Image (cartoon, rainbow, N blue to C red):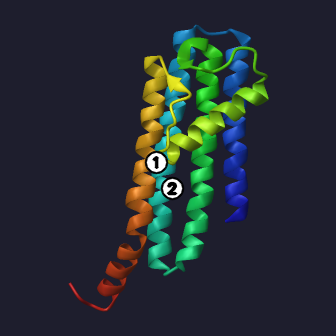
C-alpha cells in the first residue's frame, strides 16, 4: 500500500511537471493548454473518486479498524489537495488573470505554496476568500475540487461505519 501511494504522489508530480513544461514551451495556444489542464484534472478527479470508493468497499469488506481507514483517507485527501494545487498553478501559469489576489513576482515555489493553501482551504470548506477564481476555467476547477471534497468527506468518511454495519448484517444472512 505504501509503495502504491508513493507511486501515486510521483505520478502527480510527473503529470504536473510535463504539463508545466508544455506551458513553458509555448507550443500550444492558451485555450488548448487550458483544455488540457481541465481534461487531465477531470480524469484525475474520476480516478480519485473511484479509488476512494474502492478503498471504502475494501475497508468495509475486510472490516478494517476505523483509524486505519482514516489514515488511508488522509493520504488520499493529501493527494487530491496536491493534485489541485498543481492544476491551479498551471492555470495561473497560462493566464495570470485566472485568480485574484495572487501577488505578482512570486517564485514558482511561492506560487505553488499559495495554491496549496488555497486548495487545502477549498477541500476543508473554509475558503477564506483571499484567493478567488476569476476565469471560467478556474471556477470550473474550484467547483470540481469542492465537489470531490464533498463526496469524499460527506459520503465516504461518514458512511464508512454504516457501510461496515450493513455488510456485517448481510453476511449474517439478513435482508
Location of the N terminus (image quadrant): bottom right
Where residue 62 appears, x then y in whole percent?
Answer: 50, 80
Q: Secondary structure at mark 2?
A: helix
| Marker disc for residue 51 | 2
Left or right of residue 65, residue 171 in this image: left
Left or right of residue 172, residue 32 in this image: right
Q: Are marks 2 and 1 in contact (CB under 8 Å)?
A: no
Left or right of residue 155, residue 19 in this image: right
**Depth order, front residue of 152/51:** 152
Position of residue 56 relative to residue 95, above or below, is below
Where residue 107 appears, x then y in whole percent?
Answer: 79, 22
Please tell me which residue is depicted at 75% across the width and 20% down the height of the picture. Answer: 106
Q: Secondary structure at mark 1?
A: helix
| Marker disc for residue 128 | none
Question: Residue 100 lies in what quarter of the image?
Answer: top right
Any part of residue 27 in sight: yes
Please tell me which residue is depicted at 63% across the width and 58% down the height of the picture. Answer: 75
| Marker disc for residue 149 | 1
Question: Residue 114 lies in what quarter of the image?
Answer: top right
Any part of residue 95 in sight: no
- Mark 2 crowd level (few <14, some 14–19, many ≥20, 10 Å Cα): few
Amino acid at each position: 500500500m505504501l509503495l502504491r501511494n508513493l507511486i501515486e504522489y510521483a505520478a502527480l508530480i510527473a503529470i504536473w511537471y510535463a504539463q508545466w513544461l508544455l506551458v513553458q514551451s509555448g507550443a500550444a495556444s492558451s485555450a488548448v493548454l487550458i483544455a488540457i489542464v481541465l481534461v487531465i484534472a477531470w480524469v484525475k478527479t474520476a480516478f480519485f473518486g473511484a479509488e476512494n470508493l474502492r478503498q471504502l468497499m475494501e475497508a468495509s469488506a475486510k472490516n478494517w479498524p476505523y483509524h486505519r481507514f482514516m489514515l488511508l483517507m488522509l493520504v488520499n485527501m493529501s493527494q487530491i489537495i496536491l493534485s489541485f494545487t498543481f492544476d491551479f498553478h498551471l492555470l495561473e501559469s497560462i493566464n495570470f488573470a485566472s485568480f485574484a489576489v495572487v501577488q505578482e513576482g512570486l517564485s514558482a515555489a511561492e506560487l505553488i505554496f499559495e495554491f496549496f493553501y488555497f486548495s487545502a482551504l477549498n477541500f476543508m470548506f473554509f475558503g477564506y476568500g483571499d484567493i478567488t477564481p476569476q476565469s471560467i476555467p478556474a471556477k470550473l476547477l474550484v467547483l470540481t475540487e469542492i465537489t470531490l471534497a464533498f463526496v469524499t468527506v460527506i459520503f465516504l468518511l461518514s458512511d464508512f461505519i454504516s457501510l461496515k454495519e450493513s455488510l456485517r448484517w448481510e453476511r449474517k444472512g439478513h435482508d
